[in-house]
Amino acid sequence: MTIATRDTRAWLDVVQSLAPAIEAQRANAERERTISGELVEQFQAAGLYSLKLPRAYGGDEVGHPTFFAIVEALARIDAASGWVIHVGNEMTASAGYLPTAGGRRIFGQGRPPVLAGAVNSRPGTRAEAVPGGYRVTGQWSLASGAPIASWFAAASVILTPDGPLRNAHGAPDVHYFLIQPGDWRVVDTWDSLGLRASGSHDVAVDGAFVPDDAHFPIITTDSPFDTPLWRGRYPTHLGGIGSVALGVARMAIDELLRMAGEKVPSLTSTPLRERPTIQQSIGRAEALVRASRTYMYAALESMWQTELGGEAPTPAQLADLRLAVVHAVQSSAEAVEAMYRAAGATAVYRSSPLEGAMRDVLVLTQHMAGSTMRYEQAGRFLVGLEPGPR
């Protein structure tokens, strides 16, 4: 059963058609710490910001395996481009959980908006009930794509006179509140080691009004759409960081293979490709990437087939995907570091793709979904304990 208007191969062809535009703006995007508005327009026109938008609002509802493959292909060209499309679509997936009136108003008026969003908030962040909705105030960190977005999805607990509103499990009930254009502002904080062009600045909101139809609880399983993408709770849409990491690692291996056929290290007459240590590094990196990629896509396919069959993903499937994603990130980082070291001094220059790959993959390992702490969550599930909501 398929529901997407294009198959995976067709989407990958779309990505390749955009490669010249992505590469042309990469250096400037690094300097400006955001991809260009012109590239965003091209991404929108190509449908790359509508991958996880309900078909009722003009989107494609691509399956999880196809979505990850698209992001991986983008990241193989440019990590930041893969990252902003991955995060932008995670935010766009909120359209499937909003009440229909809010979904139509925000997402159903022609070309869908570009969303940034963030969970990490600074002290004092709050959402308070007022007539007709909520008043939201706070500052959020790591809002990837903020400079190119029009709407902002702010994660916050709801404060009541008795303290934070709590969910059925007794934990604070965190909701995403969709903040309209003009009611939020970018705070310039993103001066990073890698993924510089992702524009992951802070966002500040000062008492913005959010109507009742423009928010939803993050762990909800309620959706007005009975279609596969929204049969699981919102966190089923997370994890694209794994495909970004794999794309970066594949690019790094490709770059070293190219160098190995050309470079003869100083003070030697032996080409790089004839050195056993280099051959071993390439072989190990290839195994790391292929194995972790196979595991991640198998976990994605299992979850997707369950959703296609009319059911929500099981806790075991969600735990397996979390483990597969962190394994993909950590394996990719190991592969990229091996390629960087094998390249020698050539890799330390900003002109080398391996220099950028090393910086980008190190930042990916610091994200909570790519951190080694995720292994602990997987282990908790395997020994029969609650792994946590994300």
Image (cartoon, rainbow, N blue to C red):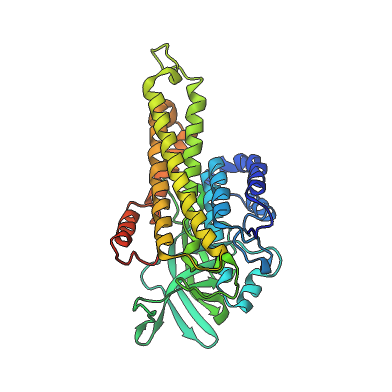
* Image coords of residue 324 (percent x, y): 41, 51
* Image coords of residue 339 (percent x, y): 42, 32
* Image coords of residue 89 (percent x, y): 56, 59
Viewport quadrant of the C terminus: bottom left
- Residue 4's place in the image compared with 195, above or below, is below
Q: Residue furthest right?
A: 110
- Residue 199's place in the image compared with 169, above or below, is above
The reply to whether residue 180 is in sight is yes
Q: State the residue at coordinates (41%, 65%).
A: 315
- Residue 320's place in the image compared with 226, above or below, is above
Q: State the residue at coordinates (37%, 39%).
A: 334
The reply to whether residue 146 is in sight is no
Decide if residue 343 is on the left or right side of residue 38.
left
Counting every numbered tag in the picture gives 0
Closer to the camera in the image, 152 or 302: 302
Q: Quadrant of residue 361?
A: top left
Viewport quadrant of the N terminus: bottom right
Q: State the residue at coordinates (40%, 73%).
A: 125
Closer to the camera in the image, 146 or 328: 328
Q: Residue furthest top?
A: 269
Q: State the residue at coordinates (43%, 30%).
A: 347
Closer to the camera in the image, 191 or 319: 319
